[in-house]
């Protein structure tokens, strides 16, 4: 359980404080390291980094060795080394040649790696369109015409193209184990090509300060092999299955205008300004990885959105407890 004191200045000069309690702590995530490259592209970048490291280590050893050699040679016996020795000009060839050769080799390796990780796109269509919102991630799959939020499923073992867009301000997509970061700039389409080596779960976050809840803008990537991925994509195309017992919640969802921001396929709610909730209950977390997806947390969120994620675009509808329960139960049934 996590709790903190949330204080606000009121217009009458008073300070109003309340204790905010998270019943569910922010879910833990496994350690993510840029050195554990999980895409072919990240591996190429890390390989180049290793070459740089080796070259830098060689230069460090050479310079340190020569410095020590000269210090020892010319300080022990000062009196005998009065005469000046002029270094033969032949030494200028390796002194200039070796650094120039190293620069040329690394220039070539850099260009080769850049071309490999950022191949020309041409008129290739993206496999997934990622949109950064304040403060969540939208993933749209153009081939299947479906969307999800914050938990992005991607196929493993296949080169894929992601298109990066922003719905508001500048965000930055970064999954450490996938290598490079991509800035997401309003009015601009950026692209990233990745080949995830094998199925697994990977975590990342927004890396460009984008407002009050920048720190709560996590993304989870679930990489699946071809068959599982196709099956998942297929399940997303099916309308949400919700038992009749949740009819009250579904009715309230529409009546309370939730559908003005959220889409639930099969209802009149078709807006994409908030996360798509069609298969909401199939996701492990919500609020961009902030809370575990369970009935209690959904109820808390609907009841006190501004206490849990201050500044988020979700308004407090001042719903009665029974309505909160009905809507939360309905959402919790949307597998
Ligand atoms: Cu989005 Cu920081």
Image (spheres, grey):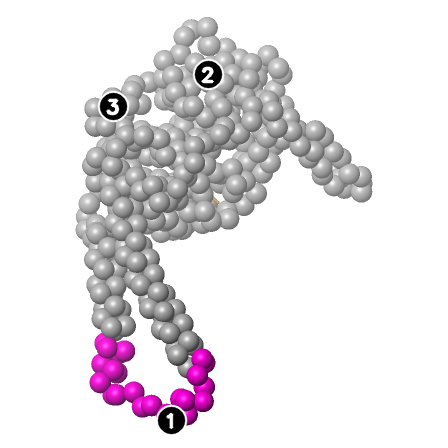
Secondary structure type for disc 3: helix
- Distance from label 1 to label 2 (Cα)? 88 Å
Where is residue 26 drawn, in percent x and y?
A: 53, 29
**Considering only vertical position in the picture, is 137 above or below 116?**
above
Q: Mark 2 or mark 3, which is nearer to you?
A: 3
Q: What residue is at 34 percent from the left and 61 percent from the top? A: 57
Where is residue 126 drawn, in percent x and y?
A: 25, 41
**Considering only vertical position in the picture, is 290 above or below 206?**
above
Crowd tier of the residue under label 2, counting other residues whose Cα lies within 10 Å: few below 14, some 14–19, many 20 or above: many
**Considering only vertical position in the picture, is 251 above or below 214?**
above
Quadrant of the rendering where the N terminus is positioned: top right
Q: What residue is at 41 percent from the left and 23 percent from the top? A: 283
Q: What residue is at 38 percent from the left and 16 percent from the top? A: 335
Q: Nearer the viewer, residue 160 or 330?
A: 160
Secondary structure type for disc 2: loop
Q: What residue is at 70 percent from the left and 29 percent from the top? A: 19
Crowd tier of the residue under label 1, counting other residues whose Cα lies within 10 Å: few below 14, some 14–19, many 20 or above: few
Q: Return the residue at label 2.
A: 332
Is there any visible trace of residue 15 in the rendered image? yes
Q: Return the residue at label 3.
A: 228
Return the mark for residue 83: 1
Q: Mark 1 or mark 3, which is nearer to you?
A: 1
> Considering only order in the chain, which callout, 2 or 1, is on the residue closer to the N terminus?
1
Disc 2 to disc 3: CB gap under 8 Å: no
Magenta stretch, residue numbers: 75-97
Is there any visible trace of residue 145 in the rendered image? no
Q: Is 84 colored magenta in this rendering?
A: yes
Q: Does the magenta stretch mainly form a helix, a strand or a loop?
A: helix
Respond yes or no on whether mark 1 lies under 8 Å from ligand 1.
Answer: no
């Amino acid at each position: 359980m996590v709790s903190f004191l949330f204080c606000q200045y009121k217009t009458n000069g008073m300070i109003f404080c309340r204790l905010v309690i998270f019943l569910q702590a922010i879910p833990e995530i496994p350690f993510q390291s840029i050195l554990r490259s999980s895409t072919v592209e990240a591996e190429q970048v890390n390989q180049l980094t290793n070459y740089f490291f080796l070259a830098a280590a060689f230069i460090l050893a050479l310079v340190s060795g020569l410095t020590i050699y000269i210090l020892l040679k010319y300080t022990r016996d000062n009196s005998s080394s009065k005469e000046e020795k002029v270094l033969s000009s032949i030494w200028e060839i390796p002194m200039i040649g070796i650094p120039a050769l190293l620069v040329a080799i690394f220039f070539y390796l850099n260009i080769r790696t850049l071309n490999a990780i950022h191949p020309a796109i041409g008129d290739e269509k993206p496999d997934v369109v990622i949109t950064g919102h304040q403060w969540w991630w939208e993933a749209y799959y153009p081939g299947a015409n479906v969307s999800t939020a914050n938990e992005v499923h991607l196929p493993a073992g296949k080169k894929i193209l992601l298109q990066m867009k922003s719905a508001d301000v500048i965000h930055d997509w970064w999954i450490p184990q996938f290598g490079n970061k991509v800035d997401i700039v309003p009015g601009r389409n950026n692209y990233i090509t990745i080949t995830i080596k094998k199925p697994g779960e990977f975590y990342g976050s927004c890396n460009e300060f984008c407002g009050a809840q920048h720190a709560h803008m996590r993304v989870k990537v679930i990489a699946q092999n071809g068959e599982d991925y196709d099956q998942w994509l297929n399940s997303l195309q099916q309308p949400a299955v919700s038992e009749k017992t949740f009819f009250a919640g579904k009715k309230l969802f529409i009546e309370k205008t939730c559908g003005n921001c959220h889409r639930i396929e099969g209802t009149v709610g078709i807006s994409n300004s908030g996360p798509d909730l069609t298969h909401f209950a199939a996701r492990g977390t919500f609020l961009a990885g902030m809370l575990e997806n369970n009935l209690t947390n959904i109820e808390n969120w609907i009841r006190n959105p501004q206490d849990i994620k201050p500044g988020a675009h979700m308004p407090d509808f001042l719903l009665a407890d029974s309505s909160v329960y009905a809507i939360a139960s309905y959402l919790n049934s949307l597998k």
